[in-house]
Image (spheres, rainbow, N blue to C red):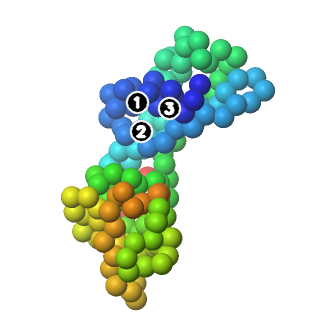
């Protein structure tokens, strides 16, 4: 099974449970495959939620001919360095740190890796606020990949600092 096939199978279930499918991967081992699925939602993801989604995914995969030979499933949250790729992600994480890999350097920079904070989000991209430098406007089609660089000590609205 490919990661694309896995995503196609689990996406409807993950969405129905109220989560976003962030990433998935497939690795082969001598006695089957390991499926890794990363889920998220604005309120965060609990260990119990990961266990429930894992159980539901297993039910779907048990009867699939592409999983013959056995399989393991690992469901987790994407963590603090999660990937971001949609405008909705950039809106949700406005004010957070981000590391961006550019496809090709654009006017105003010769760097292919940029680090800064997510600023205002527009129709086709966002502003990258860089400490000690000018802000850059990046279009989504210029970005090869981007991952959050969240500060674990930063206070965020809507989060109880004493809760887990």
Residue 72 at what x, y percent from top left? 64, 27
Among the two numbered marks 2 and 1 on one chain, the one whose residue lies closer to the N terminus: 1
- CB-based contact (under 8 Å), mark 1 and mark 3: no
Image-based side of 158 in relation to 61, left or right: left
Image-based side of 155 in relation to 67, left or right: left
Q: Residue furthest left?
A: 123
- CB-based contact (under 8 Å), mark 2 and mark 3: no
User: Residue 11, labelled with which disc?
Assistant: 1
User: Residue 21, labelled with which disc?
Assistant: 2
- CB-based contact (under 8 Å), mark 2 and mark 1: yes
Q: Nearer the viewer, residue 43 or 11?
A: 11
**Nearer the observer, disc 2 or disc 3?**
3
Q: Nearer the viewer, residue 80 or 109?
A: 109
The residue that label 3 is drawn on is 4
Residue neighbourhood size for the residue with mark 2, other residues' Cα within 10 Å, grouped as few (<14), some (14–19), many (≥20): many
In space, the residues marked 2 and 3 are separated at their CA atoms by 12 Å
């Amino acid at each position: 099974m490919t990661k694309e096939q896995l995503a196609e199978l689990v996406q409807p279930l993950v969405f129905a449970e109220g989560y976003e499918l962030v990433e998935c991967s497939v690795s082969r081992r001598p006695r089957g495959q390991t499926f890794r699925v990363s889920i998220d939602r604005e309120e965060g993801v609990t260990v119990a939620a990961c266990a429930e989604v894992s159980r539901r995914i297993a039910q779907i995969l048990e009867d699939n001919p592409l999983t013959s030979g056995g399989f393991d499933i690992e469901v987790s949250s994407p963590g603090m360095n999660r990937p971001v790729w949609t405008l909705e992600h950039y809106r949700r994480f406005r004010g957070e740190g981000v590391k961006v890999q550019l496809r090709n350097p654009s006017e105003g920079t010769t760097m292919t890796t940029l680090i800064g904070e997510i600023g205002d989000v527009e129709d086709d991209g966002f502003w990258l606020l860089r400490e000690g430098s000018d802000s850059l406007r990046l279009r989504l089609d210029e970005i090869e990949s981007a991952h959050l660089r969240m500060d674990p000590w930063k206070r965020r609205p809507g989060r109880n600092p004493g809760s887990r």
